[in-house]
Amino acid sequence: MLSPYISRGVISTKQIVNYILSLNIDWCKIEKIIQELAWRDYWQLIWVNKKNQIFTDLKNPQQNIENHKIPDAIINAETKINAVDEAIKVLYSTGYMHNHMRMYVASVCCNVAKCHWLTPAKWLYSNLYDGDIASNHLSWQWVSGTFSNKKYYANQSNINKYFNSGQKGTFLDVEYPDFYSMATPNILKPVSDLKTNCILPSLNDPEIRNIKTLVFNYYNLDPDWHKNEGFQKVLLLEPSFFEKFPINQNCLDFAISLSVNLKNIKLFVGEFQELAQIISFENLFYKEHPTNKHYKGNEENRDWICEQKGYYPSFFSFWKKCKKELKAKINENET
Ligand SMILES: Cc1cc2nc3c(=O)[nH]c(=O)nc-3n(C[C@H](O)[C@H](O)[C@H](O)COP(=O)(O)OP(=O)(O)OC[C@H]3O[C@@H](n4cnc5c(N)ncnc54)[C@H](O)[C@@H]3O)c2cc1C
């Protein structure tokens, strides 16, 4: 459950990997967790390299789509797949859903209910405390076969095995070959557009001055960034950003609660250009991210696990290079 803190930029994948490496544990015991962290960097790199293309079918057009909406049964946690419904209720109350369950939900929406992946992907993102456009949207693309060679399916017995349930007779209680010719189950037929509820705070801090300023945002709440260097700190919440990437109120509240780690941070609700009318560009410092390409001033690099910066069409081609770099680093530290 590290991911809400990584997604909100409180800690970085690199910090975690460096910490794990400092423990001097055998590589075979740490490879799995490092590989999982590398998945996040991999999705981020695709976003950096492919830019807005990640909002469209990336490698293949999604096959067999009936609509661009989301099933009401998913929104209302009424699919009658008990483990799925329970997980959606937990998502609404905690902002968290297990990785396997995210895959099952995506498979039900895209491959069983035949919705295009984008609207349901936005729904999940809008409810996750760890919402990260790259990890989220590209995982949905992976499940729906637009960033992989085949669609991902999970049947009831798979769900029963991993979620310790014994349910039978549901629309997922079929053998895998049956999925390819399955009609959309009636319960998944009513569909809706995405609805979110998020009200940005209305008060701005009147004390914002034209001095060297660190700009924090929904993806960067790093309390160690230029710590104790006398910068003014501003949390910028842009209405246009939340319109483009809608979230629910509890996710915003979670992010704002994390900003208390940033001593004396000042809130600015408005567009970057409006902030730039108060603070000149040479005084503005921010971390590179695909969501803030319109910022101007001093852009700083963010942390990555390894030096690879290009586009890799498959995770394992990226991981091969990343692993080589990490192993070289371990050898260097040992000698
Ligand atoms: C459909 C779908 C949507 C997803 N949406 C998001 C999202 O919006 N934000 C998000 O952070 N993750 C997303 N993931 C990835 C993964 O589900 C979460 O990172 C993971 O569940 C977070 O829980 P954890 O911290 O306990 O993970 P752990 O299992 O403890 O893993 C440790 C860390 O490794 C990284 N990680 C592990 N698995 C993945 C993965 N498959 N992809 C990317 N990073 C991974 C995360 O940074 C995670 O915190 C999504 C996966 C799917 C299938």
Image (spheres, rainbow, N blue to C red):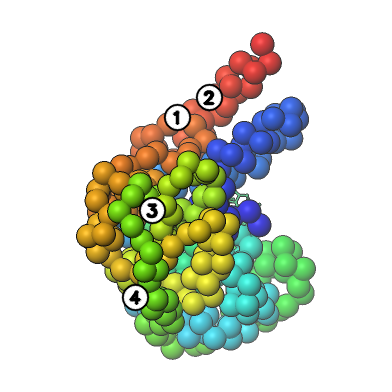
Label placed on residue 89: none
Q: Residue at x 39, y 46 (%)?
A: 287
Relative horizontal placement of residue 260, taking residue 297 as reference (left or right):
right
User: Dot 3: what SS?
Assistant: strand
Q: Which residue is mark 4?
A: 68
Q: For marks 3 and 2, give the CA distance.
A: 32 Å
Q: Quadrant of residue 236?
A: bottom left
Please name the amino acid that badge 3 sits on: Val
User: Dot 2: what SS?
Assistant: helix
Q: Position of residue 47 (x, y in %)?
A: 36, 49
Mark 4: few/some/many CA within 10 Å (<14, 14-19, 20+): some
Tell me which label, 1 or 4, sits earlier in the chain. Answer: 4
Tell me, yes or no, whether the two marked residues, 2 and 1, touch with CB atoms within 8 Å.
Answer: yes
Q: Which residue is mark 3?
A: 215
Q: Position of residue 1 (x, y in %)?
A: 66, 57
Number of numbered discs on residues: 4
Please name the amino acid that badge 2 sits on: Glu
